[in-house]
Image (cartoon, rainbow, N blue to C red):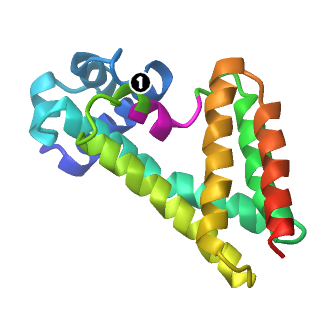
């Protein structure tokens, strides 16, 4: 019976997601991903030309689900715009309390690839962060706030800065404090 190429590719990406997120991209070999996916290394390379392409596919696979989750947290939050922005931070803090939480996979990957700015995964990560910032700006503009792009950038700086500090201190209260600061920025922009 012929194998479904799409399902095989998905198994490889799912294995990469699990391993790269939990252990980091540099620590995980292509052999480990192939083994976890239940495929040969040759099959993996049939679907991905290189480990670099696999890393980019890993982040691409996380792009829309992550953006959708952040938007859902915003949409489900009660209150005004500031409360909804703060809810994103509050939900990230709640996620960070899980023992398997390892931070933002996009930021961690970018940090591991800091010496290779043209890497396809760095470009995927930058695009993801840009999409989120643009989405935040849209929410701010829809609420009538002036200078929404600058305010969105400041909110993203608070979020990503808090991600970094939480990795250092393993303390989710940093992102809760950053959420309150983001809410204060939104309220002061009114």
Residue 17 position (above or below residue 151): above
Q: Residues within 10 Å of mark 1 (few under 14, many from 20)?
A: some
Residue 132 position (above or below residue 174): below
> Which residue position is annotated with label 1?
19
Label the magenta part by its dominant secondary structure: helix
Give the residue displayed 12% in from the left and 45% down from the top: 2
Indicate the quadrant containing the C terminus: top left, top right, bottom left or bottom right. Answer: bottom right
- Name the quadrant containing residue 96: top right
Q: Is residue 57 something that shows in the picture?
A: no
Mark 1 element type: helix
Residue 11 position (above or below residue 179): above
Q: Nearer the viewer, residue 178 or 150?
A: 150
Q: Nearer the viewer, residue 29 or 79?
A: 79
- Name the quadrant containing residue 162: top right
Side (left or right) of 173 relative to 109: right
Q: Residue furthest right?
A: 79
Q: Position of residue 169 (x, y in %)?
A: 71, 19
Indicate the quadrant containing the N terminus: top left, top right, bottom left or bottom right. Answer: top left
Side (left or right) of 6 relative to 112: left
Q: Position of residue 66 (x, y in %)?
A: 54, 51
Give the residue displayed 55% in from the left and 61% down from the top: 133
Extent of the magenta region: 103-110
Side (left or right) of 104 relative to 41: right
Q: Is residue 44 something that shows in the picture?
A: yes
Give the residue displayed 80% in from the left and 66% down from the top: 186
């Amino acid at each position: 019976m012929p194998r479904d190429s799409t399902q095989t590719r998905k198994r490889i990406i799912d294995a990469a997601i699990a391993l790269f997120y939990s252990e980091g991209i540099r620590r995980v070999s292509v052999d480990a991903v192939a083994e976890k996916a239940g495929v040969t290394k040759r099959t993996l390379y049939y679907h991905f030309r290189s480990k670099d392409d696999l890393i980019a596919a890993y982040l691409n696979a996380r792009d829309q689900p992550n953006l959708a989750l952040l938007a859902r947290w915003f949409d489900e939050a009660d209150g005004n715009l500031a409360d909804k922005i703060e809810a994103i931070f509050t939900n990230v803090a709640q996620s960070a309390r899980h023992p398997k939480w390892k931070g933002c996979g996009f930021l961690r990957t970018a940090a591991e690839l800091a010496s290779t700015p043209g890497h396809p995964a760095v470009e995927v990560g930058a695009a993801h962060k840009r999409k989120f910032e643009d989405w935040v700006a849209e929410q701010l503009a829809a609420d009538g706030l002036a200078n929404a792009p600058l305010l969105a950038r400041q909110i993203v700086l608070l979020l990503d800065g808090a991600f970094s500090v939480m990795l250092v201190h393993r303390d989710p209260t940093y992102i809760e404090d950053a959420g309150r600061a983001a809410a204060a920025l939104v309220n002061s922009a009114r």
